[in-house]
């Protein structure tokens, strides 16, 4: 009934009546996302009628009302086929100031029309394959980049930027060709990075360092939304960027990583918005070549070094507890380097673990990022090991029991999700310089068995990557307890009585044969398959493992 009345007015009424009826319709259906199939034909005709109004010279307020209703109707995929034509798309492009002939954004009164047109394009492109194809034909990505350049350094047009970026994100998500066009032809990487710089109001103090005002106000909701959309679009543009062929690309990725470092050190208008901002920054950092991630840490400035030294010197010599507290609070400094961004990533990772759900989507990106950073950059690895795997003192509890970051990560090593389990184990393994004995010290053999089996390291040894020489970090408490630590569980156990001590030799022989018969039965019924280790440390059926060792022995005896 609403569509029928609106359609009648749109076809026969004047601009004022059209504006009123469409405003009533949009107010009533603002939150409508599911539509009755019985009125489908009426909605199609209403869309066609709205496009006919939009080509006329009607007031701006009437255009806005038309576009609001069109945005609501475009949520329904079924009605878009007849209205998604090249002519109608061009009408929306003109209203959104996406035509190349529109040189500037001077008329503030037109801003609501531009925003609503971009919203309509977002819905139509997302819901219609025909519109997606027309976007390629009309070179929509280039027009959007041009509009972004017009918005550069302009205030009060955050909504235009936001929906321009959202449409760029959708296009680059739905078309791989547009990703390549954005990256190379349209210079999307520096353009979108500049959008982020503008949203964060970055002031550079060095080539890859920015000034961070820790006491400054949080980002506004509009700036945060713009930044999130830019981060998502950049993710699509850089999704295949692990290899950097040119020095200019390497510089651009370093600039982007420096901007993302700044992003990690600021907050949004709310805790949820801050998490969304940091989550998208983490996803984008995962696309940055690992050689360019060194800009996440930087040497302390003279002011920061002087401030830290002054704080300690001002305390009296007998105030040892206060000095320890100051040093404890200096968690973002390691080896003369500012580790604030890495500390934020570590805190973000722990929050995602504590959520207890959606580990694959929410946790694996940041774990993977920290793993690659640790593998490639020594200072990052040493800082993270200091925080995640500090020297062991109390070994009375199992490694997976407790509330420390180490305990939480060890629990993930036996998670049901294979991807989560593997990346958690890999992270701890890299922190241990890929040394099996070091990993087992912190996790126990039982928790680490999956990783070691996959790597062919069940017999011990170390991974393929090279790290600096080890240093002894064992505490006196650990050294004293080490002989009594259960290697499987990784913790100190009270000595248990040996059940065979009180058996006679006949009883021992009987129990041994009973066990052999049980294993033989399970093996013959293929419920259990005896396995052994090959010389390279990988698992294989026992017969094959024994045969390989026999060949090795024969070869060595022939050599002798």
Image: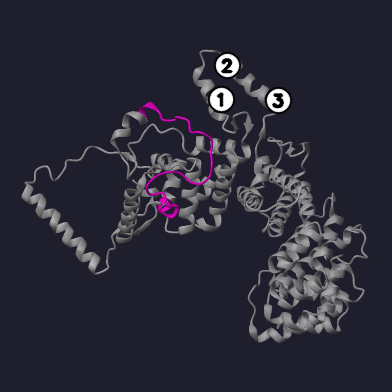
Asked if residue 465 can be seen in this view, the reply is: yes
Q: Position of residue 482 (x, y in %)?
A: 33, 33
For the residues labelled 2 and 3, say whether their Cβ atoms are less than 8 Å apart: no
Q: CA distance from mark 1 to mark 2?
A: 10 Å
Q: Secondary structure at mark 2?
A: loop
Looking at this view, is 277 or 531 the one in front? Answer: 531
Q: Residue at x 40, y 48 (%)?
A: 448
Q: Position of residue 219 (x, y in %)?
A: 71, 46
Q: Residue at x 90, y 70 (%)?
A: 59
Q: Quadrant of residue 291?
A: top right
For the residues labelled 1 and 2, say whether their Cβ atoms are less than 8 Å apart: yes
Q: Position of residue 392 (x, y in %)?
A: 41, 33
Magenta stretch: helix, strand or loop mostly: loop
Q: Residue at x 27, y 39 (%)?
A: 493
Give the mark nearer the N terminus: 1 vs 2.
2
* Residue 80, above or below 428: below
* Residue 543, above or below 315: below
Give the mark nearer the N terminus: 2 vs 3.
3
User: In this figure, which residue is indicated by the disc labeled 1?
Assistant: 326
Looking at this view, is 113 or 409 the one in front? Answer: 409
Asked if residue 24 can be seen in this view, the reply is: no
Q: CA distance from mark 1 to mark 3?
A: 17 Å
The magenta stretch is: 450-477
Q: Secondary structure at mark 1?
A: helix
User: In this figure, which residue is indicated by the disc labeled 2?
Assistant: 315
Would residue 82 be found to the left or right of residue 91 on screen? left
User: In this figure, which residue is indicated by the disc labeled 3?
Assistant: 303
- Figure quadrant of the N terminus: bottom right
């Amino acid at each position: 009934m609403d569509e029928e009345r609106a359609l009648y007015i749109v076809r026969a009424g004047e601009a004022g009546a059209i504006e009123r009826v469409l405003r009533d319709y949009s107010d009533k259906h603002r939150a409508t996302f599911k539509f009755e199939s019985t009125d489908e034909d009426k909605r199609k005709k209403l869309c066609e009628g709205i496009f006919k109004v939009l080509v006329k010279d009607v007031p701006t307020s009437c255009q806005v009302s038309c576009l609001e209703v069109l945005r609501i109707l475009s949520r329904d995929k079924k009605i878009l086929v007849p209205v998604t034509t090249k002519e109608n798309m061009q009408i929306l492009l003109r209203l959104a100031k996406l035509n190349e002939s529109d040189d500037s954004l001077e008329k503030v009164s037109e801003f609501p029309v531009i925003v609503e047109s971009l919203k309509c394009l977002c819905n139509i492109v997302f819901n219609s394959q025909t519109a997606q194809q027309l976007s390629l034909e009309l070179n929509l990505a280039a027009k959007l980049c041009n509009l972004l350049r017009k918005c550069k350094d302009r205030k009060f047009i955050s909504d235009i930027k936001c929906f321009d970026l959202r449409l760029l994100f959708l296009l680059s998500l739905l078309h791989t060709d547009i990703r390549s066009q954005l990256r190379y032809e349209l210079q999307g990487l520096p353009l979108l990075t500049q959008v982020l710089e503008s949203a964060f109001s970055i002031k550079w103090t060095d080539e890859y360092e920015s000034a961070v005002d820790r006491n400054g106000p949080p980002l506004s909701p509009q700036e945060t939304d713009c930044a999130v959309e830019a981060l998502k679009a950049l993710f699509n543009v850089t999704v295949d960027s692990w290899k950097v062929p040119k020095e200019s690309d390497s510089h651009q990725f370093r600039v982007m990583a420096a901007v993302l470092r700044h992003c990690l050190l600021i907050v949004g208008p709310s805790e949820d918005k801050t998490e969304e901002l940091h989550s998208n920054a983490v996803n984008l950092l995962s696309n940055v070549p690992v050689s360019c991630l060194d800009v996440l840490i930087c040497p302390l400035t003279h002011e920061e070094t002087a401030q830290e030294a002054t704080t300690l010197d001002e305390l009296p010599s007998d105030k040892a507890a206060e000095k320890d507290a100051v040093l404890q609070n200096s968690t973002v400094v390691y080896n003369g380097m500012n580790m604030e961004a890495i500390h934020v990533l570590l805190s973000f990772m722990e929050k995602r673990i504590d959520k207890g759900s959606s580990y694959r989507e929410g946790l694996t990106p940041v774990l993977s990022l920290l793993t690659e950073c640790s593998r490639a950059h020594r200072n990052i690895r040493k800082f993270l090991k200091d925080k995640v795997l500090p020297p062991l003192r109390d070994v009375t509890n199992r490694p997976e029991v407790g509330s420390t970051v180490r305990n939480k990560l060890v629990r993930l090593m036996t998670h049901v999700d294979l991807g989560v389990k593997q990346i958690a184990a890999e992270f701890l393994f890299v922190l241990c310089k890929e040394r099996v004995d070091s990993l087992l010290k912190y996790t126990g053999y039982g928790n680490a068995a999956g990783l070691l089996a996959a790597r062919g390291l069940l017999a011990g040894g170390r991974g393929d990557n090279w790290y600096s020489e080890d240093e002894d970090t064992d505490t006196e408490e650990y050294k004293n307890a080490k002989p009594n630590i259960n290697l499987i569980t990784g913790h100190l156990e009270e000595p248990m009585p040996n059940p065979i001590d009180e058996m006679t030799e006949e009883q021992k022989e009987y129990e041994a044969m009973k066990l052999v018969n049980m294993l033989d039965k399970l093996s013959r019924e293929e419920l259990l398959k005896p396995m052994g280790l090959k010389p390279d440390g990988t698992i294989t059926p026992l017969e094959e493992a024994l045969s390989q060792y026999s060949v090795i022995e024969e070869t060595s005896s022939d050599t002798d």
